Amino acid sequence: MNGGDPRLANLFRAVALVVIAGWLLVIGKGLLIPVFAAVISVYVLTTAAEAMGRMPVLRHVGSLWRHMLVLVLFILAFIGLGLVVAVTVNQLIALAPVYRDNLETLAGQLANYVGIERHPTWADIRQATIGQLDLGAIISSLLGSVTSLGATIFLVVVYAGFLMAERFSFPAKLAAAFPRGDQAEKTAQLISDVNRRIGNYLAVKTLINVILGAISYAVLWAFGVDFALFWAVLIALFNYIPYVGSLVGVMFPVALSLAQFGSIGTTLFLAALLTGAQVYVGNILEPRMFARQLNLSTFVILVALSLWTALWGLPGAILAVPMTSMLAIIFAAFPETRFIAVLLADRIDPDDDAHDNAPAALLPR
């Protein structure tokens, strides 16, 4: 090995490190998902608490009290979300036979329209398709998944509370951990940069998702779709997933409307309005509210989305962009890993490359 190529050895170590890290992420996802979700939540909560400090009514309230208020609101929001989900799932189970009958009626009408009445008969087709569906069992399985999600959310809330409390003592810990030189100051600056950029992104993204959820709720309520509030919240949450999340979020209420109303025309009209809301928010409102988005190329976002979804499923898809952005900011802060940040970046300002703070060229402003 002494006569070997050191670059090859470094490449081997890097590949081994990536494989080990991926293995740990997979086997430890039950522990890591709540932790990472709590960290991401704290970014939003901290940014919200700082925004409260700029409000005339809360300007004179101490920082600690503002953070406590935001945390309480965060907990209440999750409790409310849990209640909405529990009530919705129970009612879905109760209404499953009605939805199934509506789908059978619609399928029968379509079969008659296209002339499928003999060879095979409609009864045969129904038995081979819709007759095989046990909506009650499907929704009961969904209830089990929701229960597991509730346990994860509880851990996220607990971890976020302790992280908020630890935040105030963290600078003192850094100073004690790095008593000599300026390493503590550089580390604190890096953490502050990550906090500011990721926090601002998540805060604005959350506000955009709330607006999208409100518009979607108004549309669903106007159509009389069952569980409009639940579907609006679901659409808002799925919008955290780039590119595909908004489409997936719309599919659920559209599918339910088909089962509820048994009308293709009504369903298509609803789908058009919900999609229009997505287009407005994604292509008009979001670019205006984001002066410059987190500096990641579209290809990198798609790869990160695929990777984190493969590792952690839906939670990984939601956390993909902020976690990848944090890695890019950290890579940009060190000369040894700056080339990785360059590869991940969407924009590079050549005027900044000549300065000592060149990593800033890779980051959004």
Image (spheres, rainbow, N blue to C red):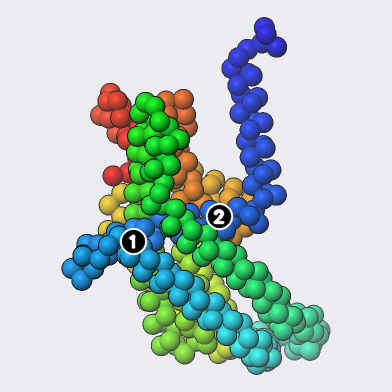
Quarter holding the C terminus? top left
Q: Which of labels 2 and 1 is toward the front?
A: 1
The residue wearing badge 2 is 35
The residue wearing badge 1 is 64
Closer to the camera in the image, 231 or 131:
231
- From what the image shows, is residue 317 above or below residue 274? above
Residue 302 on image: x %, y %: 51, 49
Q: Write down the quadrant of residue 214 in the picture.
A: bottom left
Label 1 secondary element = helix
Is residue 16 rendered to the left or right of residue 158? Answer: right
Q: Write down the quadrant of residue 289 in the picture.
A: bottom left
Label 2 secondary element = helix
Residue 355 on image: x %, y %: 27, 25
Q: Write down the quadrant of residue 23 in the picture.
A: top right
Can residue 182 be seen from the camera position used here?
yes
In this rendering, the count of numbered labels is 2
Residue 185 on image: x %, y %: 35, 34
Question: Residue 237 — which label?
Answer: none
- From what the image shows, is residue 270 above or below residue 164? below
Q: Amino acid at mark 1?
A: Leu
Q: Residue at x 62, y 57 (%)?
A: 313
Which residue is situated farthest in the top direction here?
A: 3
Quarter holding the N terminus? top right
